[in-house]
Image (cartoon, rainbow, N blue to C red):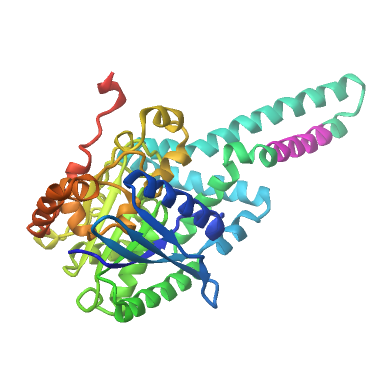
Amino acid sequence: MRVHHRHIIYVQGYDPRGLAQYYRMFRTELRKFGRLYQLSATISRPQPSPDGETASWTIETKAGDWQTRTSYDFLRWEDLIQRDLAAPIWGTIFHAVWIYWRLVFSGTIARFWKAHWRFATFITYPHFLLLIEALCASGIALAFGKGLEALGIPNLFSIAAAAALFVAVLGTMLKYTENGTYLLYLLSDTIWTWEFSHRQRPEWDERIDRFAKYLANVARASDAEEIVIVGHSSGSFLGAEILARALELDPALGRHGPRIVLLTIGGNFPIVGFHAASKDFRNHLRLLAVEPSIDWIDCQSRKDVMNFYPFDPIAGHDIDVGASRRNPTIVPVRFREIIKPEHYNLFRWKFFRVHFQFVMANERPHAYDFFMIVCGPIGLSERMAGPEAALAIATGDAAMREWAWKRLENADPGHENAADLGEMEPSARRRG
């Protein structure tokens, strides 16, 4: 399928920066994309909706023998996220620590370790760092208390003063190291995912329902050849929820109008799906697994500790749909193949930077290219079914492009070649 008009609905993760920061990053990366493939890509200014819950812009992309128009919708959560981050520091700490130990005693953390030990380590990191900072503050407070005792200050007063100093020092450390540690942000994320999983965030559910209605309306009215719902990070399970609820509103959603494709990248489904209380969410995954009119592509990277790799969003949740299963197609992505070695080595240990590579421009032509998915002439399902042909259309001469288009016309809709995007990445120990 040659795409002339595509509609992207982008579902962000738990990121308080929201529209302004994302749009600037998108515009910068779009320019890099144009330079890499020597094509023209122009972008309009974002236009917020009247209710402020979405913003939209368009991209016009022109190459030698193809051009596309992309309508891009950005679904907004930053007002809800910023409200979480404005909560009192001590309330956030006590709530997050309480939730973490509930995860431990319920066995959920053990399931995280079994599914992906790197993510389990990542979710434990802020609690470990909190313990270190608390020990440092305790040492300072203890020394201060001993000093007061040496001066003959009564024990009751010295203990009270030391306790007050502990609270002041720890609070100061947490506040002024946040830009480097992201500790409070990650603790807020833990609280949010727990409460969302247990249906304790009605304002999020209400907005998801409104976004589901929006998707259903777009599908009925759009003249695009395909609609791609992109869910990055926590947006993976939010995007899945939006699509599943839209299907409940309109079971024929993918049978009339544009093709509907769900693209989840850097996903972390288990942080919701592994909770016993998340039965509705697992039922929605079951719905998407068997829906014949929807394609679902799930891209994962071993190098990204903030996604689960390798993880099957269906079998990993003990969902058995038998032979009727058709989704998702799981695609491994190797960042070292799309980034120049000198740059890859600079950021490979910067976890947030690695995590965002899924939605940033490539430095090398590759079959996985977020901006080719957004702006290119090939439908996403065909791109995943024929990655070599998709790359040839982007970089080959006229004869190669003609061969590639013919190959894509005969591409297997079952996406059997999707793994060609990157073999399951071997561990660093095996590489030596």
Classify residue 36 as left or right of residue 255: right
For the stretch drawn in magenta, what is the main secondary structure?
helix
* Residue 57 x, y percent position in the rendering: 45, 67
Q: Classify residue 259 by image quadrant.
A: bottom left
Query: Is 80 located above or below residue 331 in the figure?
Result: below
Tell me the quarter of the image containing the N terminus. Answer: bottom left
User: Can you name the residue that lies furthest to the left here?
Assistant: 410
Foreground of the two, 426 or 226? 226
Q: How many marks overall?
A: 0
* Residue 119 x, y percent position in the rendering: 39, 40
User: Can you name the residue that lies furthest to the right here?
Assistant: 152
Work out whether residue 212 can be spotted.
yes
* Residue 228 x, y percent position in the rendering: 31, 64
Q: Residue at x 42, y 31 (%)?
A: 343
Q: Classify residue 80 by image quadrant.
A: bottom right
Queried whether the magenta region covers residue 185, the answer comes back as: no
Foreground of the two, 196 or 396? 396
Query: Is 2 located above or below residue 214 in the figure?
Result: above
* Residue 132 x, y percent position in the rendering: 60, 30
Work out whether residue 315 can be spotted.
no
Foreground of the two, 352 or 209? 352
Q: Residue at x 42, y 74 (%)?
A: 209
Tell me the quarter of the image containing the C terminus. Answer: top left
Foreground of the two, 326 or 7? 7
Q: Residue at x 20, y 58 (%)?
A: 381
Queried whether the magenta region covers residue 166, the answer comes back as: yes
Highlighted range, magenta: 159-173
Classify residue 185 as left or right of residue 421: right
